[in-house]
Amino acid sequence: MSKIQPIRNRIFAGLLILSALLTLLILRLAWVQLVMKNQTVPGKTYSLAKLAEIQSERETVLDSGRGRLLDRSGAALAGETIWTAVLFPPQEVVRGASGPAAGGEPLRRLAAILGVSPEQLQSRRSALKEPLLWPDPAGKMPLALTAAQAEEVKSLGIDGVYALPFTRRYDGQEMGRQWLGYLSEASKLPGEPAPPSGLRIPLTGTDGLEKTLEPLLHGVGHTEAYVQVDARGHRLPGSSVKLRSPANPYYPLSLYTTIDRQLQVGIEELAVQAGMKEGAIVVLDTKAGDIEAMVSLPFYNPARISPQGGEWNNRALQAAVPGSIFKIVTAAAALEAGVTSPDEQFYCSGQYEKYGLSCMHGKGHGPLTLAQGFAVSCNTVFASLAERLSGGQIQAAASALGLGREISWQSEDMLGLKLLKPLAGEQRGTIFTTLLGDDSGARVQTAIGQRDVRMTPLQAANLIVTLLHGGEVRAPRILQRVAFANGQKLADLPAHVSPSAAGRISEATARQLLSWMRKVVTEGTGTSLKNIRWPVAGKSGTAQTRVKGQPRNNQWFIGYGPVDHPRYAVAVAVENVAPGSPHTATRLFGQVFDLLAASPDV
């Protein structure tokens, strides 16, 4: 008896321990099921309950939920919805089949639509473990189907194959829309909760409008298509495709720009045909100063950005040496200061006595008035004016005309942002690096747009708009309104002016300069433009610069048209060309206006 009792005690103790462990396990399971299921797994962005659900699903994102960037009429610039073919993992009964017979005529027709053989299609389809957005021939993006093709894919009734709407951010093509910017991966915005995307890292704007409008564009979650699968990744019998989305009627937002997409594409094509390698073309609406097209070269692909390259830089917002187009500013300063008159007589021998300036490769213009000197871009005339002006007068005239400072549209306390500034990469440009009031040589070089003078193509186009508004500087706008996903208006972003502390030039001076710009085309450096579809006016420029130690030129032509009822202001800057090259900027200016004249909106 004495030996049996210790054994019983040990058995009892063991049962107590086992019961305690079982109780702890039950409590732990209850804790997980009732309390921890909604807690985030360490190192992940989803809960235990979400993890269990995901493990039994296979899904693909159809729409990131990011806001759309649209042109002025609603055409997609970033965030276009297309139809594409989506293949889901097949049911187990389909596996092992091969060749066209596995799907018969429907499979052969689908293969033709997708551009592959029936054998290639069936081989790829039968091996699927995850949903597949069928790629385009380059393998970079989902293949875009026409509406008719999408309807046919739906009607084929092939198991696990669907035509679904997919929102692609970009079309994968090279383009000159650097103002759009591009996206890159980021975990989330500071202070923002983890997105409902679960396993995916969202994309965030890294440059251009994608970056400056990020708080409005980042959205509230994605839309995905999913199916239920078994442990081996086979789609469960009878499991149909389901959609899951945030179901928010207000998001994603639609942001309407002032861009005319058709015009933008047309000018991009003109630039390529002209052989333009570097530079920018800007088209502004003269009424409000809205940006209707802004093309920058070299082109870039927002879907494939190289960290080493600089093609994503927007040349339209970067300051370059302007050359003789700056003579507009010098003429304005001289007229405003009263140191000359339109009919004053000058004499050009081809060589200015000081500072090594020359005209027409040393060939003189002879006697000419200020108006004639402007038309033929005589350096002697403008060097003479510079010696009568102070540096401060030239600087003030430049500022009054929107140069040497930021002029693009911006607004404080707008749409929840302390400062809404869509074109945040805009450079100010310079007139003098220091105000050299006593250095006549510096003033002379500045007066013809050389030395320290830098101007952006956007500023150059807006300079024309300023003259057309009698000296009032408009703030060029690229974003005009924002709407909710249901079409309801969120906000209008009205155009406004950009006044200078230096004041403004007079309407009389503005009218005088505009008339001289017409003379440039009728009898000056722009006579090659006399026969284009609309009568235009403008000013040419060729700036001397150096690139990597080699002499190069920047070619410019800026102006407006049609002359009698100005609708557009255009600036063309062709940068980094060999000295002596044909003046591509003037030719492109005429081609842009022919394109504008042919527009169905005219």
Image (cartoon, grey):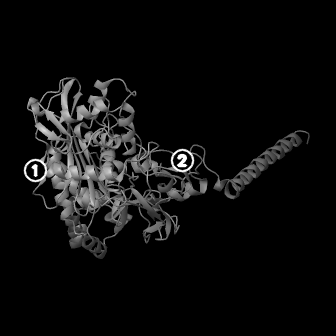
Quarter occupied by residue 126 = bottom left
Instruction: Report the side of 335 relative to 484 (left or right).
Output: left
Residue 473 coordinates in the image, percent (x, y): 39, 51
Residue that appears at 8% across and 32% down: 363
Report the front residue among 386 and 193: 386
The amino acid type of the residue labelled 2 equals Leu
Is disc 2 surrounded by few (<14), some (14 to 19) or many (20+) residues within 10 Å?
A: few
How many marks the image carries: the answer is 2
Element marked by disc 1: helix
What kind of residue is marked 1?
A: Ser
Whether residue 280 appears in this view of the structure is: yes
Residue 250: mark: none
Query: Residue at horizontal 25%, vertical 71%?
Result: 149
**Which residue sits at x=27%, y=51%?**
512
Q: Position of residue 86 (x, y in %)?
A: 34, 63
Kindly indicate whether the residue at mark 2 contacts the one at mark 1 (C-beta within 8 angstroms): no
Classify 10 Å Cα crowding around label 1: few (below 14), some (14-19), many (20 and above).
some
Q: Residue at x 17, y 50 (%)?
A: 519
Which residue matches tag 2?
189
Tag 2's secondary structure? loop
Residue 373 quadrant:
top left
* Disc 1: which residue: 528
Q: Nearer the viewer, mark 1 or mark 2?
A: 1
- Which one is earlier in the sequence, the residue at label 1 or at label 2? 2
Does residue 545 sit above or below 220 in this rendering? above
Quadrant for the N terminus in the image:
top right
**Residue lying furthest left:** 363
Looking at the figure, which quarter contains the C terminus? bottom left
**Residue 172 visible in rendering:** no
x and y percent of residue 482 in the render?
46, 62
Inter-mark Cα distance, 1 to 2: 53 Å
